[in-house]
Amino acid sequence: MTFMHPYLFWLMIIPFMIFAFLISTNKEKLSRIFDEKVLERLSAGNESMPVMLRNIIMFLAIFLMIVALARPVVEKADQTVDVKGLTLLTALDISGSMRSKDVYPNRLTFAKKKMNEFFDAMPSDDIGVVAFAHNPFVLAPFTSDKETLKMLVSGVDDSYINFGSTDFTALAELAGRLMKDKKPRILVLFTDGGDKKAIEGFSNVLKANDIDLYVVLVGTKKGAPVIDKKGKPMTLKDGTIAITQRNDALGTLAKDNNGAYVVAANGDKDMQSLANVIHAKYKAQEQGQVKIKQRVEYFYYPLGLGLFLLLIGLSSLPRLKSSRKQEAGSMGGKL
């Protein structure tokens, strides 16, 4: 048997033993500490229970309650528990086209909103987050703390946007390294898509690393002007306004890599549907195992016995009514 809070036992037992010793053996010194009238009320009168027996019962009751306060437990063998859930990597597109405003208020903000809805739809799963354009980088390591993920994603603003060419191959290589020890390996992209030239080689790296691809496409087929850092539409060399449209080629690529895609819409039903598809396919494969310490609590035994003995001890104390009668009688004799 061990104690969960042994310091409480030693903190309480030492002054208790000193106090019990003073009461039991040294009335003269005790009278220097307490008023004589207080001692008279604490001391036994002519009751049926002997003074020494009552003191022993009271001291034992207090001792047992101190033991209960220290929380005695019996340690048992550790239990191994399987942890259910998936580990997956999400990626947020921060390329220049994500400033476009064909979805409100712009593609980047809308994609971040859909990521948060996806996090909510995967409450028991470990999720990591990367941002990608020309050079992908990690925003958040794998964690089940969805509120932390939301906070980190919310910090991605226009200053992160990169007008360099989007390198999907570099993203796949980073995903392969991050999920090297994971099984299955799942990558979920939040992007406005990519043309065939941009995604050349992407599929080969995904297959080489055994990564299943899921894509959440933001934006519209009609498209919208590309916005620069100053919030103004960008123009081409011929003076016409540059227009960016959602490209669904990544959706086809996702299907070819054991995944699926969805076009992001208002509301959270699309993200819930995507989460359901992922969970149904992998059936919440095990992440691993954890060991849980098993303890049997025994504090209620000394606590219950202590309270019972305390009740017996208190019931044997001299009654206040009889004490008052004795005082009244003595006063009447004096008169």
Image: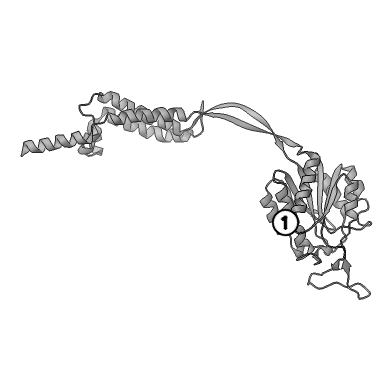
> Residue at left 41%, top 29%?
64
The relative height of residue 213 versus residue 42 in the rendered view (above or below) is below
> Residue at left 82%, top 42%?
185
- The foreground one among 39 and 335 is 335
Of helix, strand and loop, which one carries label 1? helix
Q: Is residue 181 visible?
A: no
The relative height of residue 197 versus residue 297 in the rendered view (above or below) is below
- The foreground one among 31 and 111 is 111
- The foreground one among 98 and 281 is 281
17 with respect to 25 (left or right): right
Q: Quadrant of residue 67?
A: top left
> Residue at left 73%, top 35%?
288
Amino acid tagged 1: Val
- The foreground one among 248 and 13 is 248
152 with respect to 240 (left or right): left
Quarter of the image for the C terminus: give it. top left
Most extreme residue toward the left is 335
Where does the image place residue 280, in percent across and percent down from the top left?
79, 41
Q: Quadrant of residue 152?
A: bottom right
Where does the image place residue 91, in percent across and percent down from the top left?
79, 53
Q: Which residue is mark 1?
A: 153
